[in-house]
Amino acid sequence: MTMPLEPTVYRPIVQRALDEDLGLAGDVTTASVVPADCRLEARLSVRRAGRVAGLPVALAAFDILDPEIAVRIVHGDGADVEAGTTIAVLDGPARAILTGERTALNILTRLSGIATATRRAVAEIAPHRTRVACTRKTTPGLRALEKYAVRVGGGVNHRFGLFDGVLIKDNHVAAAGGIRQTIERSREALGHMMKIEIEVDSLDQLAEAMEAGADAVLLDNMSPDQVRAAVELVDGRMVTEASGGLRPDNLRDYAATGVDIVSLGWLTHSVPGLDIGLDI
Amino acid sequence: MTMPLEPTVYRPIVQRALDEDLGLAGDVTTASVVPADCRLEARLSVRRAGRVAGLPVALAAFDILDPEIAVRIVHGDGADVEAGTTIAVLDGPARAILTGERTALNILTRLSGIATATRRAVAEIAPHRTRVACTRKTTPGLRALEKYAVRVGGGVNHRFGLFDGVLIKDNHVAAAGGIRQTIERSREALGHMMKIEIEVDSLDQLAEAMEAGADAVLLDNMSPDQVRAAVELVDGRMVTEASGGLRPDNLRDYAATGVDIVSLGWLTHSVPGLDIGLDI
Amino acid sequence: MTMPLEPTVYRPIVQRALDEDLGLAGDVTTASVVPADCRLEARLSVRRAGRVAGLPVALAAFDILDPEIAVRIVHGDGADVEAGTTIAVLDGPARAILTGERTALNILTRLSGIATATRRAVAEIAPHRTRVACTRKTTPGLRALEKYAVRVGGGVNHRFGLFDGVLIKDNHVAAAGGIRQTIERSREALGHMMKIEIEVDSLDQLAEAMEAGADAVLLDNMSPDQVRAAVELVDGRMVTEASGGLRPDNLRDYAATGVDIVSLGWLTHSVPGLDIGLDI
Amino acid sequence: MTMPLEPTVYRPIVQRALDEDLGLAGDVTTASVVPADCRLEARLSVRRAGRVAGLPVALAAFDILDPEIAVRIVHGDGADVEAGTTIAVLDGPARAILTGERTALNILTRLSGIATATRRAVAEIAPHRTRVACTRKTTPGLRALEKYAVRVGGGVNHRFGLFDGVLIKDNHVAAAGGIRQTIERSREALGHMMKIEIEVDSLDQLAEAMEAGADAVLLDNMSPDQVRAAVELVDGRMVTEASGGLRPDNLRDYAATGVDIVSLGWLTHSVPGLDIGLDI
Amino acid sequence: MTMPLEPTVYRPIVQRALDEDLGLAGDVTTASVVPADCRLEARLSVRRAGRVAGLPVALAAFDILDPEIAVRIVHGDGADVEAGTTIAVLDGPARAILTGERTALNILTRLSGIATATRRAVAEIAPHRTRVACTRKTTPGLRALEKYAVRVGGGVNHRFGLFDGVLIKDNHVAAAGGIRQTIERSREALGHMMKIEIEVDSLDQLAEAMEAGADAVLLDNMSPDQVRAAVELVDGRMVTEASGGLRPDNLRDYAATGVDIVSLGWLTHSVPGLDIGLDI
Amino acid sequence: MTMPLEPTVYRPIVQRALDEDLGLAGDVTTASVVPADCRLEARLSVRRAGRVAGLPVALAAFDILDPEIAVRIVHGDGADVEAGTTIAVLDGPARAILTGERTALNILTRLSGIATATRRAVAEIAPHRTRVACTRKTTPGLRALEKYAVRVGGGVNHRFGLFDGVLIKDNHVAAAGGIRQTIERSREALGHMMKIEIEVDSLDQLAEAMEAGADAVLLDNMSPDQVRAAVELVDGRMVTEASGGLRPDNLRDYAATGVDIVSLGWLTHSVPGLDIGLDI
């Protein structure tokens, strides 16, 4: 069961995207050329194989422009489809369909691109129990949508932001005067619902973090062999996460170490969109 | 002279990105671990060669969090830098620097990624007079920033949205009943400051568009040979634009046709970020 | 076919107008005096002859307050009506109708005033091919609505803002060091969808602008005779626009010169509202 | 002492006016033509005699664009100036001055137009103790500014909206079943800080309103003679207001009746702007 | 007839409350555990006797989350109910009901707490004609809702803010140089719809205020005996208000003085919520 | 070290509170009576003993109105002060100080009231290691501020909202079909940074929750004896929280059970404000 995205979260984002595209004058091409009573049937078609994500978000663009547009979803979020597949059919006033097209596609291609890349990473390491997580390296303004696309792709979410989990990095340790102190200060200041993860780059640091009682440890830029050694040292007493230096071609090596989580920044900052178009 | 981006345009976007990362509780790690009076010097460093774009936008994140942070820009927007180059130095309260880091980097890596890709495309076709343009295939909410990054990379902007130029596509022609009619209707309804471009996929359509008096023509998904024929037919009487099917490896072939503009959707929808970090 | 105004553009403006009138306490008169179940039929009536504009915008005020109010439009936007004509009939809860009355009328009288003045200017020069355009001298916050009212009156829109067209004035020329330089710099920095117009006040400047390849020329504060000379010099190679010093009583003289556009600031900054009331 | 307008009220309105004019691309003319380091001195000059209003509001446009612009006010709000008078001098970056010009002028001409008309109405009836008030017939979104301009012109404000005073009209009376009932219901439902005014169109209604204890009475569309009779009947026991049918040429006749207030819708809905320009 | 609260006023407040509770990730418990097609019937039940207020506001939370939730109101705003009473029944998608529960209850308990306290104060002084009013000591952001709850409780509203009535305090008098001067300045600057109340703490000040023509007088921190003397001195020529030092246990003594209004800050700043829960 | 509140979080809340109090007309009393050049020194004084919280938030009201107001903080957030203590001194333009007074005090009294109550609860159980936590029963729109006030009082925060922690209640268990299933579904759907707490009302349920691997358990409406039994059963393997039925007079009994957390809804929904005034 993929956790959904609340309309109350995504609709303002879609509205802003429409505002950006319409300005104050609106779609001058369509408004000057297409009669108000012209109607269309249009199909959202995937041009390359991938996993669909963001269809309800994209369709909100049409709904905002004209609630009279009727929509039939053929393959919704989470579906794996081949190139050429129609995923939704729109029927209604031609003007609103043509005006909303680009906004809807910009959302859909981006989110489906992320879901497709996540799904591939998940499939790549499927034999192992390791899970794929995203990071905070998301597009400004779209974090909720991109985190959702990762979930649709079969991944899990790491922190949503700076507010919902502690992740202690070397600079924090330096400022506080040591690993133990940082963890103690966080425990002291924060409630019992906040998990504490700490970034380490050596087994010594890892041992110290374990002793200080961190909930999770981020193994930063370690080789698969180093990660394996860390996982053995931890022996199930903390959640282990490998981060940094993971690429599609070495993912499986990391998963084979038994690490709990691999977190991949590129799922959200450098993935190509999935090519999707509107056919009429 | 690259046209700048108004602070009044980008600051609300940066504010929203910060809101997304801070939530209501703020940076619980930094706030619980780093003393309020701790100060830092930090450097924004480019990890791979590329062109810098978005530095003023990224720095606004620090300014919003704490105006006491002093900034020295070493290589500003438009600079081509090698891997390892420091582009800016921050000095001030440690908390605000650590809290703003990810928001600033998310902006900077994305915009510099776009500028770097644009700059490469421009360099690739440099011997020719053809110009590189972006499209409306931008990230929802970030169009002004991404269009700016394209300019920093040496490209030019196409329409900003549906409101500031007419681009007639096949569906518009179908709805209006012909190329001539669409162009006439647009001319009739719109003021003299609005340019009219029309998408064609054959020389017959091109001839009809020229007769009807379009200002520009978008040659859709044509091969370099077809584009060359079109450019010859037009003979300078309209602006010509090639779009669709252009890749880094065939860009030069298109430029060699003498076409005025090549427009590249991937500059904004599928380009990897430029790796940039904050070193302390 | 008058280009419409998107509800997504005008509804926030209507909402702000209602907020301004309702404050936090709402309509204390109606709420304290009129029973909740009281219903009314009311008619929007034009008190003086004119052209209707802004009816959908005005009616949005009632729709926001209470979607149960039924509306029947008798003479919609673009209709020329005599004094005493009912243009729409409302039927529904009395409270919402009385509460929305002033907001709706403030919108409708202003936009119909502009459409009526525009329509008169257009009729005045009807025998000629010259078109009537508005300027950026609009009411802060209402530009989209006022530009729409000009279209309803039969005029065309000039630039919507500083962002969708180049208009070079004497100060720009002075800063850049000459007419040729300004035009070249604009061409260089901007994409092919952006038109370039330049303001001139002599035939010498006009000749220079033509040579430099401007798309249009604004003939500033010239007499009809000067405009005629300019139009002859241009001879169809640029769009010509007369601006400054045009009044209802000399409009026809300007149109007789063959100039393409007359632009009139007073259509939006100094036109009286069209008197419209709500009768019950 | 004219009551001021809070910056926290007017700055969001100025920001919206700038957003409208700048869009996402900004001032493409100035940005492409004027060098970033170019500086200007510019003067706001009144082209026709009138009363200045809205200068701090207009200047906020420049301050938002670039706080480095230095301003010297020569004749501030409330000054009566001759044609050709410089009212403020700006000195600073040329780009921001040119970009902010139209927004600042649109505000200043409108508000000064209202103040000038109000001041003339006030002067016209100066020998009498009657005061000039505005109505709720204001431009959507600009009520606070226009009410302020009326104060600068020497007038007083009526209700700001539906929320801060009771004004009972015939439809309210009809719905409630009589003048006495409406006034009693309002008194019962509302606190002691709320004044109750009632619109009447005959002396019979006036007598009933007086008996029921209204605080003020609006004499609707009455001739000067009828107003005089009403004022005598009231004999100082209520505030009297004449409204409807008042024009510049009969204002003095109404004031001569001894009525307390004349309220003039045209001060805000149909007054021409005061011509003001920016000279460089 | 209690004056209602406009949905256009309260819905943005409910939306902000939901945003605060949902963040970007939404209700992670419900979304991960409860199937999307699960449906519930739930009852809003009052746990202690009191007066219901804010039900339409609270229910808007469910409506925003999912308009498919059907609602049946059993005891609406203004009802006095016993502990254990069901006031509304919800039926619909389980997820939205569980997600909206806390936001709805936080609104309902607070507003019902205020209405209950107000109703008790009103009942306490029922034999007298004195009315209970609230003050501006309200929760930041909730003034419109809390003023409404006071009305539901049978009280009346004092000023809504600084904008809709004059209340002159000792600091104003000190700055202006005397009671007479403050009242004259206010009368001069303000329109006829604005009431003027002045705070006094002695009979001498009261006499001065009466002479200067204030509409109302606030008797600040006076004992019942002092208030009685003041009321006698005023003898119906001004509205009298007692404020400061009023507690549930001495309210009746103040009312017995014949004062017109008792205003109670604690109705809005220190009243416990009324315990209300959602039972399934 | 109390975790601070970001200005970027609280300033919009203060702005909204000012908007609510100023409306469009502003402070008509002060503006009409107090000369613009009048200056004041004013002191924020606590009228009853308590702990200060929210001073920076309250002072932002003055800063927004007029940045020229100078502030000296005598006893900042977290200070325990006696009745009569001056906590801050303001010096500057009289108008802005008088206008901002009520907004600042409404914030300060509410937050200091919460901090004072929290501090008392913390002191009450000081001999024990049990910590005091708040709940989501906060004032709509003020959660971030109220959670901060609890921290200032020495308490810790529970979840900030539905988004940053799992709290499974009986309805969730019923919908999912059992305690084990709910916990498994949450673990499966959510990332490793999310803690899972479950509400139980018997030792049987507690045992099941422990087996299923919850991170924390909320012991709902149990007596101190029941809580003691639960704490013994858990024996440090989960965090234990007592909630429901805790009052100031039995808090110590609960703390004596060794439970980790007592969570108290009344800290935020039913606590009286701390009386604070502005003396001039």
Image: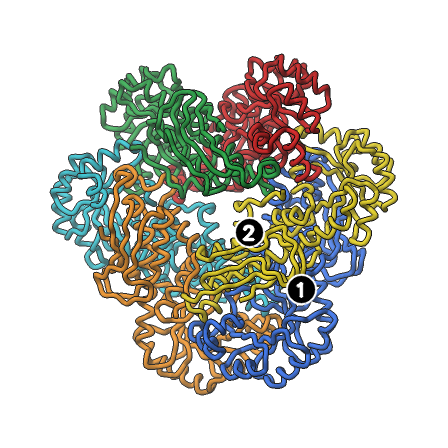
Chain colours: A cyan, B orange, C blue, D yellow, E red, F green
Q: Amino acid at mark 1?
A: Trp
- Residue E117 percent coordinates (x, y): 56, 21
Q: Quadrant of residue C22?
A: top right
Q: Residue at x 36, y 19 (%)?
A: F222
Q: Residue at x 47, y 65 (%)?
A: D40
Mark 1 sits on what residue?
Answer: C266
Q: Which mark is residue C74?
A: none
What chain letter is assigned to the residue under label 1? C
- Residue B192 is left or right of residue C105, and the answer is left
Q: Is residue F7 above or below residue B45?
A: above
Q: Quadrant of residue F123?
A: top left
- Residue B174 percent coordinates (x, y): 55, 72
Crowd tier of the residue under label 1, counting other residues whose Cα lies within 10 Å: few below 14, some 14–19, many 20 or above? many
Could you say whether the residue bearing mark 2 is in a helix, strand or loop?
helix
- Residue C73 percent coordinates (x, y): 72, 55
Q: Amino acid at mark 2?
A: Pro
Mark 2 sits on what residue?
Answer: D56
User: F211 or C79, which is in the foreground?
Assistant: C79
Q: CA distance from mark 2 to mark 1?
A: 24 Å
Question: Is residue D112 shown to the viewer in this render?
Answer: yes
Q: Is residue D210 above or below residue E262?
A: below
- Residue B1 is left or right of residue E185, and the answer is left
User: F133 or D22, which is in the foreground?
Assistant: D22
What chain letter is assigned to the residue under label 2? D
Question: Is residue A85 shown to the viewer in this render?
Answer: no
Query: Which quadrant is home to the N terminus of chain C?
Result: bottom right
User: A152 or F129, which is in the foreground?
Assistant: F129
